[in-house]
Image: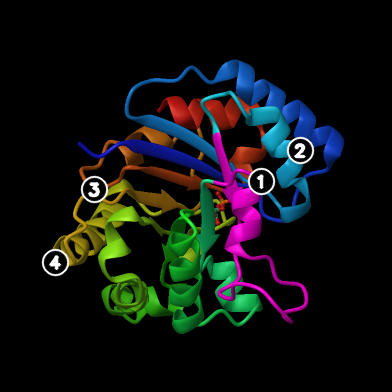
Amino acid sequence: MRGKLVVGNWKMNGGLAANAALLSELATGWKPAAGRELAVCAPYPYLPQVQGALAGTPIAWGAQDVSEHDAGAFTGEVSARMLAEFGCRYAIVGHSERRQYFGDTDAIVAAKAGSALATGITPIACVGETLAEREGRVTEAVVLRQLDAVLAAVGSGATRLVIAYEPVWAIGTGRTASPAEAQAVHATLRARLAKAGAVDVPLLYGGSVKADNAAALFAMADIDGGLIGGASLKAAEFLAIARA
Ligand code: 13P
């Protein structure tokens, strides 16, 4: 059976004091349950702090990106091997903000996923359409193009991926895809993963997930959890989402 997974994406938020309070509330408040996992993806400099606070708890952690390169003259980049040294289980790749503001193409995202997998880190590969693409009725084509790039790069590693569907128009806007809209895209992604021999890959939904809409989204057949932005910065709200 597929497990349930809820991941917090702090984005470029946090600070030593605020992180310490948040992490301690999460560590105290999260009761582990079979088949359910909670994780947080923090900015790079805070990974040692996150590791210190969460090591020995059932909560996992990860980064919000990773370099496609192994080592060398790549100023500003952070390799998968470095993330592994700080106990990261996950690395988000292909978040729409990276695609939109930092030029991450399908090919770069695919290479990043491959480099994470090669180091034993699970990539959380994000796909999602813009509002213009949804209105142009090309949602399926866009998300499948993005997914196919990753699948082609990782080959048999596909079974070790996590995929997150994040419609760009729902990120940080307060506008969530309805459970039925999200499920329709997840079913499309699931069918493509099945063809790649990876039907049981966790498929997360992201985009304005809050405590009051999480249960309805997570009840859908092909939604295995969430990738949570703003609401992951508040311990009580994030825990409520995780319990949903
Ligand atoms: P919000 O939950 O703030 O809409 O962000 C979603 C997201 O981008 C998670 O990666």
Residue wearing tag 1:
86
Residue 150: x percent and y percent? 37, 72
Earlier residue among tags 3 and 2: 2
From the image, which quarter does the N terminus lie in? top left
- CA gap between label 3 and label 2 equals 34 Å
Residue 30: x percent and y percent? 53, 21
SS class of the residue under badge 2?
Answer: helix
Whether residue 136 is situated above or below residue 188 in the rendered picture:
below
Between marks 4 and 2 in the image, the one whose residue lies nearer the viewer:
2
Whether residue 157 is visible, yes or no, is: yes
- Classify 10 Å Cα crowding around label 3: few (below 14), some (14-19), many (20 and above): many
- CA gap between label 1 and label 2 equals 10 Å
Residue 14: x percent and y percent? 78, 44
- CA gap between label 1 and label 4 equals 34 Å
SS class of the residue under badge 4?
Answer: helix
Residue wearing tag 4:
195
From the image, which quarter does the C terminus lie in? top left
- CA gap between label 4 and label 3 equals 15 Å
**Left or right, 126 with reference to 191:** right
Identified at 46% across, 52% down, the residue is: 206
Residue numbers of the magenta segment: 60-88
